[in-house]
Each structure stands twice: as C-alpha cells, then as structure tokens.
Image: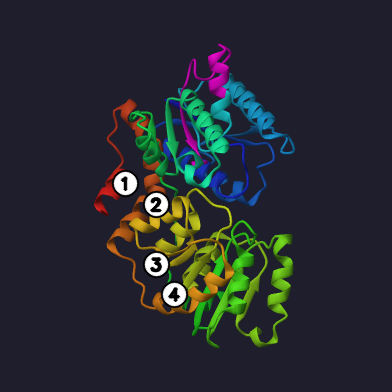
Amino acid sequence: MRTLVFEAHVGGHFLNHAGLVSAALAEAGAESHVAVATGAPGSFEFESCIAPHRGRVQIHPSIAIDERANPGKKARAKYAALSSLVRELKPDRVYLPTSDGVVQTMALFRLVGLDDVLRSTHVEALLMNGAVGHPELLSQREHWKRRISYRVAKWGCHTLYHLNPFVRDWEMAQGIPEERLIRIMPDPVEVEKISKAAARARLGLPPNGRFVGMVGRLDRRKGAHVLIEAFLSADLGPDDMLLLWGPCADEIAPDVRRLLARDDLRHRVWFRDGVLKDEDFYQAIAAMDLLALPYTTTIGSSSIVIRAAAAGRPVVTTGGGWAERVMKRFPLGWTLAGPDPQQLAAMLPRVLEQSANWVPSEAVRRFVEFSSPQNFVAHWTDGLRAATGLPRASAFRSWQELWDSSS
C-alpha cells in the first residue's frame, strides 16, 4: 500500500502533524511518502518534525505556492501540486492533514469531470475550520457561506475529519443524517511531565509566588493586551507575577512598553520576546499557576487549553465556541463572558487563589488522553489498518466515548 501525506504549510503545528501521520503510516506497513513546500527544508519545523523520519518515509519538498496570492488562487495551486504528485507517485491513499480550500477545490473539479485525484485515489482530509458548528458566533450571511463550503468539502474526499467536535452537534440540530465519512479527530498535544518547581528552576523563574501568564504568539487575537490591562488593574499581591513568553506582535508592543515602564512591577513581570522551543513551551506552562487566554477571536479548538490540561494547569479563557462547550463538560478552568480587561481583572484574585488547589479530575485525564499524539495517529491509520487486515491501534479513543464517559 503506497500512501502520500500532503502538507503545503510550514509554520506552527502543520509539519508536526504531517510528520506524525507519515511516520505512523510507515509503521502500519505502508510505503509512506510526504510532500512539503519547496521552502520547508532548513526550517526549524522541517528539521524537527520531518527530517527525523528520513529513511522510513520518502520526502518530497515539491509544493511551490505563492503565499502572497489570494486564498482561492492558493487553493488551486495546492490542488494542482497534489494532482501532479498523484500522477507521479500513484498512491493508493492520500492524506491531507490541512485540507481547507484544497478539498473544496477537488470537489469542484470533480463535479465538472476534471478531477484526477479522487477518480483514482482514496482521500482522507482534516478540516481545521469548524466555524459552521457555531452559528451563534457568525452573521447569517457568513454562516451560509460556511455551510456551503462545508457541504462542498464532503464531496471532495472519502473520509472527512474535524478538529471541532461540535460541528456534528450542529448537524444533528439541523436534522442532517449521520454520515460514515464524518469523524472527529483529536487535536494532538504532547507535554513533558515536569513539576512546577522544576520548570521554574529550568527557566530561571522565582520558586515562590503565583504566576499567571500566556505563552506562544502574543497578539490581539489571543488577547495579550487584555491580559496586560487586567494585570495592571487587578487587586493582586506582591507575590503575584505575570509571565509573557512568545513572539510579540507589533500591535502589542505599546502595551508591553507600558507594562515594563511600571517601576512597582519590576520584579513581578517576566517578559521574553522570542520563539519557544517545544521544551520551553512545556516548561513555561508547567511553571505557571494559571494560564490566561482572553481571546478576542476564537471559535475552534485551542491547543494551548489542551496543553494546560495535560500539564495539570487550569485556564481562564473567553467563552463562546469550542472553549465554552468543552469547559462546560470538562472542569478545565473558568470562562469570561468576553475579552473584557476589567472583568478579567476582577476574576484574577479569585481564580489565582483557587488555582493553588486545582487538581485535574478523572474527566480531564480522559480528555487529555483523547488529545494525545498516539490517538491522533491511531485515527489517521484506522482506515489503512482496516483495509490491510490489521487490528485497530490500541491507543484509539473516540470523541463519543470520551463525551459519554464524562456525562
């Protein structure tokens, strides 16, 4: 069985997903190929997520996309690159860890009789955008656009995965019958097991006191400015500290300068502007008492919320979309009605106090288990295993199983 994993993106988690899937397919007995962007080799993501599998997986850095092009043109270019690879490699199965745009383009080409991918190849695709499942957060016009895009995506592959499990809830509410091709995929998170004391020692942070903070990119979408404003005005004690670590967007720089200009906070603010290695990311989360994620724009799955749960740390985040529904079922922390710095400031003393005694429940442990990389690859290899007569991977856990067990 010959397989092809196709991933045109480089930054963020994209190549990590492609590396996990292509390696798992090889371990399941496939002749595994992975195609990545021409500019991927040499990047940190490629060297850490793709290059280590060289030998087990055949790597093709052949996808050339103009990132300055509009989304429609980029989707067509990705589809053209995929078609070329299918003609060249003749895979039995194609896997698209990031399929938004490409799978819809494939469906449209199929409808007019010009598709040469689906015609000869089994395709499994993951949709990253699950906004169609949250009509309460979209205008009526925008939701109809999402509905059309989602429906077209179903025509473009044999198995369609979602990171956002609440898309299926919306379908059920609409009376849309269950389709075997729709499956819920884990958002994979791996966290190094490390104590708070050890994490702070490794990062050079004070061993005592309470830390609230944010890691990863610091921008307005994530609400970094909301957290800064809340920390500045909250009624906190001298041992309550703020950790901000990640690439700082220009739009946040004025807020950071105002924060750092406060002489009375000189020993309570820890700001590090830069990209985090994986081990730094894990340690920064483990070093904190509370993760604050007052998103201004978010609908889908938040990997940082999952990382915090895996590290045994609670979060306070903006309600709405995936976060609110997940946190109503699993005790992962607290939600804000909106990204309001004054509301967050009023909550911080209380939730910091409660975070000191926060212990992940059995339901949270199962939530973390569902979100493991092992379960992620078990889902991707499930169809291949069935087709080749192999048993289902022991790590396989379904979302329905998790949801039912936590009710």
Identify residue for label 4.
351
Identity of the residue furthest to the front in this view: 140
Counting from the top left corner in percent of width and height, residue 68 is at: 74, 38
Tag 1–tag 3 contact (CB < 8 Å): no
Left or right: 329, with 216 as reference point:
left
- Residue 115 lies, with reference to residue 382, above or below; the image says above
- Of badges 4 and 2, the one in the foreground is 4
Q: Which residues are magenta?
A: 106-130
Mark 4 or mark 2: name the one nearer the start of the chain: 4
Labels 2 and 1: the sequence-earlier one: 2
Above or below for 225 versus 39: below
Q: Nearer the viewer, residue 287 or 100?
A: 100
Work out which quarter of the rendered image holds the N terminus and state it.
top left
How far is disc 3 from disc 4 in space, using C-alphas?
15 Å
Please tell me whether residue 19 is drawn above or below residue 221 in the rendered image: above
**Residue 166, quarter of picture:** top left
Q: Which residue is mark 2?
A: 372
Q: Which residue is mark 3?
A: 312
Are the residues at dot 2 and dot 3 in contact (C-beta closer than 8 Å)?
no
Circle 4 Cα neighbour tier, 10 Å, few/some/many (<14 / 14–19 / ≥20): many
Label 1 – label 3 distance at C-alpha = 21 Å
Point 69% across, 32% down: residue: 64
Mark-to-mark CA distance, 1 and 4:
34 Å
Q: Residues within 10 Å of mark 3 (few under 14, many from 20)?
A: many
Residue 395, numbered circle: 1
First reached walking from the N terminus: tag 2 or tag 3: 3
How far is mark 2 from mark 1, CA to CA?
A: 9 Å
Left or right side of 153 for 259 = right
Which quadrant would residue 277 be assigned to in this image?
bottom right
The answer to whether the residue labelled 2 contacts the one labelled 1, judged by CB atoms less than 8 Å apart, is: yes
Q: Amino acid at mark 1?
A: Ala
Q: Secondary structure at mark 3?
A: loop
